[in-house]
Image (cartoon, grey):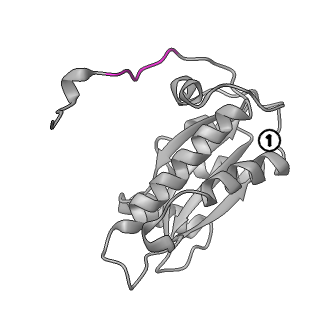
């Protein structure tokens, strides 16, 4: 059931979840909801330089844990989404990373609305992680594994770590 939280509450309640209920499977319908949110993200010149790999196979989640040093939460998560960047020849170098980050953030926020937890595990630009995930999922060049997002039902509810800090703002009036 979807939450009726207002949008700032969704943002404020988003957390990086590292412990999941392994008995609560993420459904294909839930994954499709997350992927729809991802594909609604803005992108430079609407190039949509992304593809996604939705993983629910336990053996593959365990393989990611073996090759990504910061993805141990996948041992209890029941799904993962791999965001795959597609660099565009007609775009200046680097915009795909901004576009894929926007898509990733949309997944994280939609998951909160669906009562799911997520954790964003960076892959790009760390070449050893890019190579390992590329090999594991047979991702051909020039496509680039951008990140792995753990998805599942939270088994923990960490306190907020982010906050508004006026000292980080410069107002130009």
- Residue at 37% x, 67% y is 95
**Residue at the bottom extreme, as displayed:** 90
Give 104 or 123, whichever is nearer the viewer. Answer: 104
- Pick the quarter of the image with the N terminus: top right
Quarter where residue 60 is shown: bottom right
Whether residue 75 is visible, yes or no, is: yes
Residue 46 in the image, given as x and y percentages of width and height: 50, 71
Give 2 or 18, whichever is nearer the viewer. Answer: 2
**Residue at the top extreme, as displayed:** 159
Quarter where residue 156 is shown: top right
Residue 73 in the image, given as x and y percentages of width and height: 59, 35
Residue 49 as seen in the image, left or right of residue 152: left
- Queried whether the magenta region covers residue 141, the answer comes back as no
Mark 1 crowd level (few <14, some 14–19, many ≥20, 10 Å Cα): some
Whether residue 56 is visible, yes or no, is: no
Residue 82 in the image, given as x and y percentages of width and height: 60, 57
Q: Secondary structure at mark 1?
A: loop
- Pick the quarter of the image with the C terminus: top left
Read off the magenta span. 159-164
Q: Is residue 85 above or below residue 68?
A: below
- Residue at 66% x, 47% y is 62
Q: Is residue 28 above or below residue 160?
A: below
Q: Main secondary structure of the magenta part?
A: loop
Q: Which residue is mark 1?
A: 26
């Amino acid at each position: 059931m979807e939450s009726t939280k207002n949008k700032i509450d969704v943002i404020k309640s988003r957390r990086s979840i590292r412990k999941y209920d392994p008995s609560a499977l993420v459904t294909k319908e839930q994954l499709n909801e997350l992927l729809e949110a991802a594909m609604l993200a803005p992108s430079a010149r609407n190039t949509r330089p992304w593809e996604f790999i939705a993983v629910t196979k336990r053996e593959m989640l365990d393989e990611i844990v073996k090759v990504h040093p910061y993805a141990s939460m996948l041992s209890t998560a029941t799904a993962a989404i791999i965001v795959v960047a597609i660099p565009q020849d007609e775009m200046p170098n680097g915009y795909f990373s901004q576009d894929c980050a926007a898509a990733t953030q949309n997944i994280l926020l939609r998951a909160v609305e669906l009562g799911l937890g997520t954790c964003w595990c960076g892959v790009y630009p760390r070449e050893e992680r890019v190579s390992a995930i590329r090999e594991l999922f047979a991702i051909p060049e020039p496509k680039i594994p951008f990140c792995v997002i753990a998805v599942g039902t939270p088994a923990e509810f960490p306190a907020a770590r982010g906050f508004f800090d006026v000292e980080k703002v410069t107002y130009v009036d």
